[in-house]
Amino acid sequence: MASWGRRLWFGDGILPHQRIHEGKMFHAHVFKGAVANNGSLQIMITTVDQKLTNLIPFASASGHAEMVIYEGVAFSGGSPLDAHNLKRNSPSTYGGSLVHTPNILSLGSTLLQAVVPGGEGGNAVGSSPDLYIEWLLAPRTAYLYELINRRGNAADLSLSLLFYTTHPETYD
């Protein structure tokens, strides 16, 4: 993926705008206000069989936070999370599963650990990290996206995933 101006360009040469018109672009989001210091917001995505999931995470916080992505996570439960098709009249659905606040049994491998800077004291304005990197997630794999409040007191957290699926041979 590259960025020209304000447009994102996915690695297969197709703009997200086209994926939206095709009814193939999905979005999942969780927001939680007043998350205690060291508390977190989590989204678990289990990818589709025999397809790659192309995904861009977006995280924001009202103070310092930490974004961590894990691969090969073992979990149980969690609250179901809808994958909203961005073409609102499309019948297409995401074939994988999404939950928030799962019970983590094993974290697997850490893929990314990044700071979400938010300022200090009266200067704590919040921000979003420069994480807008396209990830090509492996088929049949569980990924945990976790945003951890590191502000020192309560903070609002927001975590979003923008994604679509494609056949692996597209990237051979």
Image (cartoon, grey):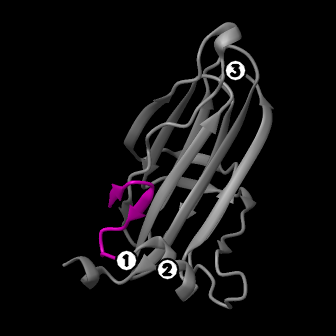
- Read off the residue under disc 2: 19
Please, what secondary structure does the residue beneath circle 3 have?
Answer: loop
Q: Amino acid at mark 3?
A: Asn
* Above-or-below relation of 155 to 137: above
Q: Residue at x 66, y 23 (%)?
A: 125
On the picture, is 139 further left or further right than 118? left
Q: Amino acid at mark 2?
A: Arg
**Hey, which residue is sitting farthest bottom in the picture?**
91
Q: Nearer the viewer, residue 75 or 151?
A: 151
* Above-or-below relation of 29 to 165: above
- Read off the residue under disc 3: 37
Q: Residue 82 in the image: state x and y as whole percent.
A: 72, 68
Q: Residue 159 in the image: state x and y as whole percent.
A: 63, 47
- Read off the residue under disc 1: 14
Q: Are marks 2 and 1 in contact (CB under 8 Å)?
A: yes
> Is label 2 or label 3 in front?
2
